[in-house]
Image (spheres, rainbow, N blue to C red):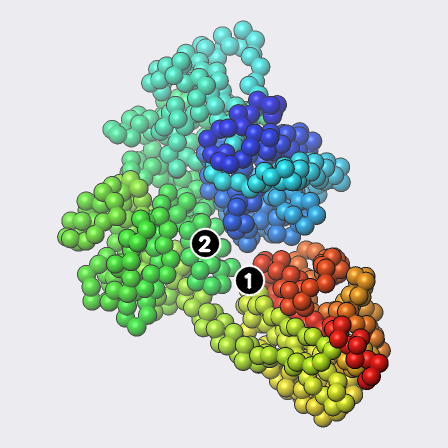
Amino acid sequence: MAHPDCVRARADGVGAATDAMVQALARAAVSAVEAVGGYAGGVYLRSRSGELLLLALFTGLPLPLFRPWWRMQVNRPFPVAEAYRSGQAVHLPDAASAMSRFPQLVAGLPFPFASLYEPVATGSERFGVLLVLRPPTPGAPVGAGDRKRLREAAEELARELSALSAAGVPVAWEGDPVGVPAEAPEAGAAGARGAVERLAQAVLSLDRQGRIGFVNSAAERLVGVGAGHLQGRLLWEALPWLGHPSHDDHFRAVFMSSEPVHFSARRGRHPPGEWLSVGLYPASDGVTVTIGAADPPASPPDPATGPGSPADQASALYRPVALAIALTEAVTARQVSAVVTDELLPAFGGRQLAIYLLDQRHLYLAWETGFPQGFLDRFDGVALDVRLPGVETLTTGRPLFFESMQRLAAAYPGIPLDADVGARAFLPLIASGRPVGSCILGFDAPRGFSPEERTVLTALAGLIAQALARARRYDSEAALAHGLQAALLPHRLPVREHVDTVGRYLPGSAGMDVGGDWYDVVETGSRRLALVIGDVQGHGVAAAATMGQLRSAVRAFALAGSTPEQVVRGTNRLLIDLDPGQFASCCYVVLDPASGSALAVRAGHPQPLLRHPDGRTEVLDLAGGVVLGVDPEASYPVTELRLEPGAVLALYTDGLVERPGVDIDEGVERLRLALASGLPVPLAETADRLIGSTADRPDDIALLLASLTNGHERAAPGG
């Protein structure tokens, strides 16, 4: 492996990154690969927007072969995104473990390899993920020693990046990744070189980046290029006919596993040249390539689309399979469109995408990427009687393929074009016989569409249509749930002397968005305030409706003068009568602002926090009963509290402290520290600060704060 000091830090694509940051990334990647016996590794860093992870640096593999994985949405079900989101390492010792947890990874890279992912973070700041690829160990987990060494490498990198960040260097990535070259293999003995020179086959040696080293004499005759033109260049630049997308998976396979690979390729395509057999033989320090004469295959493929052997066709399906898997996990129309952009375009080499959705016999633009700004606006809202390819593909149900822009212009005279050169595919989006919309795929260069590609694209259009139809149903239900939730939550809280209360609610940023979290403040008799917070199981309209019923029940019991224990017991029995099998957690506190005394009842809900006037903040230890809706005879003990003037009581739902793969106690501790660290400010600012760092929240959040004001101190002696 190369020493990182040899990296040219200002390579193309580094963007605003500094030499120091690139050198730190290189040191971490090289040391991690060597420490755990890997053959490749790199670092993903967050983008400036925070929505993407970008491959910043990599060593041990040819970067062009892995372009589809240079960018990764942080919310995608891939191991690097999971490690970043959760802050926990992900170790996949073999293909079986990868398939069980991350089928999309295996769909795109169906080779035997192990992969290890370690978050790069310090404190609450997440920089990215350090990863290593190595040979698989089927049935054997990653050992404790390797886990420790990888973690130490990530921690050292986190310290370096934190220091750079403190010095004002933006630790984020833009542009393409930097490649760290591998060490050139040592020259073989003269006798071995002579033996290779006598072979009739062409023999080339590649380093781990795909750069050509040794070339024997037969190469010039077989590939038509002299050794001087080959040495030192990337294989796919020196011999472009080996860079056809149909060969990519062969090269990915040999660089990621230890098994040789053989395939046929055609030298040159315009005009088509002779057929050659290509052999790839991997080793730890590189790959040996052999090229020899071969007979034409029984069914020569179209030169415009590349080889058509079963292996080539299977390779071409890997990325569409990943698209199909990803579509099953997309929930909203925006998520569906993003998945199509991330998976479908790279699979077929497209650069432009537009999705139109049907509404009231008109097509409306729902998503676009790659087109000139504003170009598609003229087609937004077109009726179904307009003669346009995007309309006709939907009304006829037939996909339309145009190998060049000239053919598109000839078929639709006068149609505005966004480019003079390229190709276009128009796909109908039809789900279960019902029209949903149309999809446009754009390509920067003319290209043919083989029968296999047309079949695959048409089938994928059906999957996209089904996903969009499902997403639109979801969007409708979510809108209804949002409206119901907004109507049922309190629009304002009571204003009382000597006490401030502030409530906040945020829907989840993923999944069904709206859940059954709620809060309320009720003015009861005897000049007291009832503070209540709860969380109904589930999401969507049903959970929001149950939440509304429980909130009404609690208010009714409270206004009737029931004791805290009676309020919770009555609500528990009501929930069992209303919806057997549904359950909810709840915390109910009755506060006397005049004295600061309080009575609290907890039903399976997270423990509240109490910040004392001196800043000391504790997690309260309230006695509690089971969640509501389980046991009609459940009892709920009462705990007595006292709030001093200036103290802040925080009630919250688990969405504020719970994250996948992280113990909830860690989340509670983070919230406690956040509440303790702030200086005394208006209660509304405290509430905004506590929920302000929850952009990536799988669940909805409710927060209720209550504080006795300083005015209470002056009023107490007379009251």
> In this orientation, which residue lies closer to the viewer: 259 or 147?
147
State the mark number for residue 476: none
- The residue singled out by tag 1 in the image is 510
Q: In which image quadrant can residue 32 be found?
A: top right
Q: Is residue 649 left or right of residue 106?
A: right
Q: CA distance from mark 2 to mark 1?
A: 15 Å
Residue displayed at 29% across by 35% down: 303
Task: Give the label, 2 or 1, closer to the camera.
Answer: 1
Position in image of residue 279 (x %, y %): 46, 26
- Asked whether 79 or 325 is in front, the reply is 79
> Which residue is located at x 52 percent, y 32 percent?
178
Q: Quadrant of the C terminus?
A: bottom right
Which amino acid type corresponds to the residue marked 1 in the rendered image? Ala
Work out which quarter of the rendered image holds the N terminus and state it. Answer: top right
Say which of 27 and 94 sits in front: 27
Observer able to see residue 397? no
Tell me the SS state at disc 2: helix
| Residue under numbered circle 2 | 339
Vertical order, 434 against 425 (above or below): below
Looking at the rendered structure, the kind of residue marked 2 is Val
Specify whether 688 is left or right of 613: left
Q: Nearer the viewer, residue 49 or 140?
A: 49
